[in-house]
Image (tube, rainbow, N blue to C red):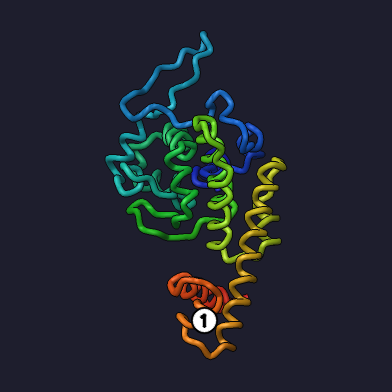
Amino acid sequence: MNPNAPEPTDAAAPAPTESGSGNPTPARGPRNNRRGPGPQRGQQRGANPASGTPPPRHHPMLDQLASLYPALFGEVFLPMKRGIFQDLLDAHPDALDKDGLKAALALHTRSTRYLTAVASGQPRCDLSGQPVEDLAPEHVHHALVEVFRRRQGRAPQDLRAKLRQRIEQAFEASGMGAEAYAALVQTRDEAVNTLTLEALDAVVSRAAKDAALLRAFEASGKTVDEFADMYGMGGADANRTLERARARAAKPA
């Protein structure tokens, strides 16, 4: 890989140690909004190095990319495949400046809109917007934490419960075991690590209860509605729980 052209997509959900800004902490907001979302396109601000004004957070090349590849850079952002930098240079060797493209992609992948796309767990896409590879679980997790950190700084309410729920969903989607997942996504921020472990414990506990309920149902000889009535559950709730347990049991160990 070209050392002068770091993968922009791998920076999309950066581990805090890679960003140089420290690990995100749930209870505090963004630090000087250094990595927060920039102005909307068309609202570019000039930089004045002498006065210490920060550089513009919008790059004109992003408009060019949106015009060339609306499925990837248009109104709806998608996680980009690894190697997209070189793909773009190869497709437009004369139209895209290498340094300008690198700067544009760096701004794009650090935007809250892009991080939100990564946090959703969607697959990485090629220039046509077609899914080509799955996101690594740690990239999804770090994006979740970073988006939460930015939103928490603007929200009057505590968003940690919502973050924990999203971590639970990301963990289940990963198909990994709790110990391996925790080791993979661990950061130097103990508050985030603690919240993550709480989320994993909740999923493991819920899965154990679902599995026990499925075993009891299979041994009961009852219909779902009869079984639900025995346990004081609604029929729909019991059916969802049993289907969830069956789906987990069907996954390879």
Q: Which residue appears at 61% of the width and 36% of the height?
A: 19
Tell me where residue 180 sits by quadrant: bottom right
Q: Residue at x 51, y 43 (%)?
A: 12
Residue furthest bottom in the image: 221
Which is nearer the eye, 30 or 58?
A: 30
Q: Position of residue 84 (x, y in %)?
A: 44, 48
The residue pinned by badge 1 equals 227
Picture coordinates of residue 141 (x, y %)? 57, 50
Residue type at numbered disc 1: Phe
Q: Is residue 111 above or below residue 181?
A: above
Looking at this view, is 80 or 85 the one in front? 80
Quadrant location of the C terminus in the rendered image: bottom right
Q: Is residue 251 at least partly visible in the picture? A: no
Task: Name the one closer to the observer, 91 or 35.
Answer: 35
What secondary structure is marked by label 1? helix
Residue 92 as seen in the image, left or right of residue 181? left
Residue at horizontal 31%, vertical 42%? 75
